[in-house]
Amino acid sequence: MPDSGEEMSLTVEEAASLRQGFTYCPRCRAEMVNREVYGRVRRVCSDPECRFVQFIDPKVTAAVMAEKDGRILMVRRTMDPERGKWCFPGGFMEIGETPQQTAVRECREESGYEVDLIRLIDVFYYEDYRGSGVLIMYKGKVVGGQPATGDDTDQVGLFGLDDLPEIAFDTNRQAIALWREGKLCDD
Ligand SMILES: [Zn+2]
């Protein structure tokens, strides 16, 4: 992987991060190389004048665990990762919206349901082959809408703790563990 001609050993986090690295500098179009700067190996412009550094950050996502008639709303994924498994409606934040708006929008797009958010459940960190991310998970309740699938879901379901489908993502399994422990029953 090192392409700067130096011996370099990468941590798992560095290797994962560098997979999203630029090939060419977006500022001066010179080749980007792996080089240690600011305490870890990063993608750095090879031009000695430019020296642009690419900081590869976690993506931010928001999701909602929404209750309806004592059951919890989930959607089945048609996209990788975890295609065919079920997760809470959620997705990537867009610039110009709050995480609360992201959770409500994604729920509408993926499930057809309108939700009101009640409170924050927790903030989770995750890593997968695409990189790393932060998931902000809200508790909510369904207040309207009809079940309807979206671009990346093909089923909408309501589940109890005793009849859960196969769950996608560690973050979702962690949220379900909190639910199972009775830690979400304060509202
Ligand atoms: Zn450059």
Image (spheres, rainbow, N blue to C red):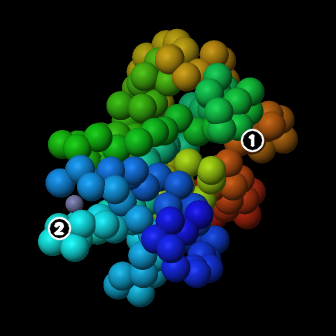
Residue shown at 58%/81% (left/top)? 7
| Percent coordinates x, y for residue 149 in the rendering | 54, 15
Residue 77 visible here = yes
Residue farthest to the bottom, as pictured:
39
| Percent coordinates x, y for residue 151 in the rendering | 50, 17
Residue 159 visible here = no
Residue shown at 37%/35% (left/top)? 104
Marks 2 and 1, how far apart in space?
Answer: 46 Å
Is disc 2's CB within 8 Å of ligand 1?
yes
Q: Residue 103 carries which label?
A: none
Residue farthest to the front, as pictured:
5
Describe the element under mark 1 as helix, strand or loop.
Answer: loop
Q: Residue 167 carries which label?
A: 1
Neighbour class for label 2 at 10 Å: few (<14), some, many (≥20)? some
Say which of marks 2 and 1 sits in front. 2
Three-letter amino acid code at disc 1? Ile
Three-letter amino acid code at disc 2? Cys
Neighbour class for label 1 at 10 Å: few (<14), some, many (≥20)? some
The quadrant where residue 44 appears: bottom left
Looking at the rendering, the quadrant in which ligand 1 lies is bottom left
Quarter of the image where the N terminus is located:
bottom right
Residue 31 drawn above or below residue 110: below
Residue 171 drawn above or below residue 72: below
N-terminal of the pair, mark 2 or mark 1, is 2
| Horizontal arrangement in the rendering, residue 144 relative to residue 110 (left or right) | left
Label 2: which residue?
Answer: 50
| Horizontal arrangement in the rendering, residue 126 relative to residue 98 (left or right) | right
Residue shown at 55%/22% (left/top)? 152
| Percent coordinates x, y for residue 135 in the rendering | 49, 55
Describe the element under mark 2 as helix, strand or loop.
Answer: loop
